Image: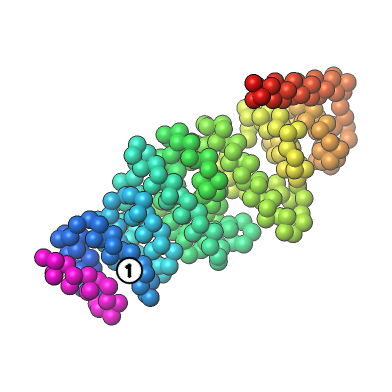
Amino acid sequence: MVDAVVLFEKIALDAGRDIYARVAGVRAIATLAEPNYSAELWAKLNCSAHAIEQRLLAELLEEACPNVHNVEHLLKSLEVIDCDKRKSDFYSLRNAMDDFICKVTINNNVEVLNKLIDGLDRLFRCKPFINDEYCKVSANHAWLISYAALMLEKMIESKCESVFSQRALSVLISIAQVKSSWGHSGYNDYEDSLGELIPEWPELNDALYWETLYQARTSYEKVGNGGAELWGVASHNSFWVIDENSYTRLLKSISNLECEEEQLAALSTVIDLYWWTNKPKKMLDDLKVAAQTNSSLQGLMQVRLGPTLTEISDTQRRLYASRKRQEVVEKKNSSNGKSG
């Protein structure tokens, strides 16, 4: 038996052999040897001078248990694999990926999910991108985006706190960009519910909003653009929602932001909402109060709404002053609580 397994391993590792013989070798090892033997074979294939073939990876995945070690092997394979979407082998790989991801559950595989999300985020950041401005997602790895969406749906539905990680938020942004990318078919085969799930979780909705803004700001700092341009990019294709029920959360956070570009972008978010919702008076009053934070925000209000609409009343000034006093008291109480 041992001699047979060694022979099958040699066949599977021989890049000069016919692909069907190599697949048969992998299948025989999965049947005859211990499970860890297949994992060791996978590691050897990843270390080969030749990138692993689609059909071989599909065969390995079909028999693999969803554990951290196998995820590491999978990510290493995906990093170098050359996917030919015209071949039937690619569809075999996709089916194997579907089955592997379906095996991963929140109850006993959170670590595996986190490992997969972290690895996919790194792959999605590899150049060349689908679009250098509006879809900065790897053109070579975008076919994996639907699997990322499926995993994140599981995490959100289970209220898994790991979804607040920077990696998970970044992948959510990538999914939204690919989903809205004109002419890109990598997402067409999967209908997600992220657009419904995320707004229903206010903390996640807002965290995704700020991460989207942060990524846009990081990109725009390289070309020296300001808050208005920043908001234009940040609002392009997203799962987060700022509406009549949630905009006050955004306005209240402005005075606590240290970055002026983010303050301007946040205010622009609500100004856009103001126009889209037929200019409700209460929203305008809330905007005026929030703009008192600094002169740049007041200037943006003047540009976007005009001097007549942005004129602030004494009542609104008193409201702003009252809110500032309340913030000071809350910070003092919070500080006392930590020291105690």
Residue to which mark 1 is pinned: 45
Image quadrant holding the N terminus, namely bottom left
Whether residue 269 is visible here, answered yes or no, is yes
Residue 101 position (above or below residue 155) = below
Give the main secondary structure, helix, strand or loop, of the magenta stretch: helix
Classify residue 276 by image quadrant: top right
Position in image of residue 207 (x %, y %): 59, 38
- In this view, the residue in front, 49 or 135, is 49
- In this view, the residue in front, 112 or 121, is 112
Asked whether residue 8 is drawn in magenta, I would say yes
Q: In terms of secondary structure, where does tag 1 sit?
A: helix
Question: Where does the magenta region start and end?
Answer: 1-18
- In this view, the residue in front, 125 or 248, is 125
Q: Residue, x 71% and y 35% (percent of image)?
A: 270
Q: Is residue 231 left or right of residue 292?
A: left
Asked whether residue 279 is drawn in magenta, I would say no
Position in image of residue 65 (x %, y %): 28, 51
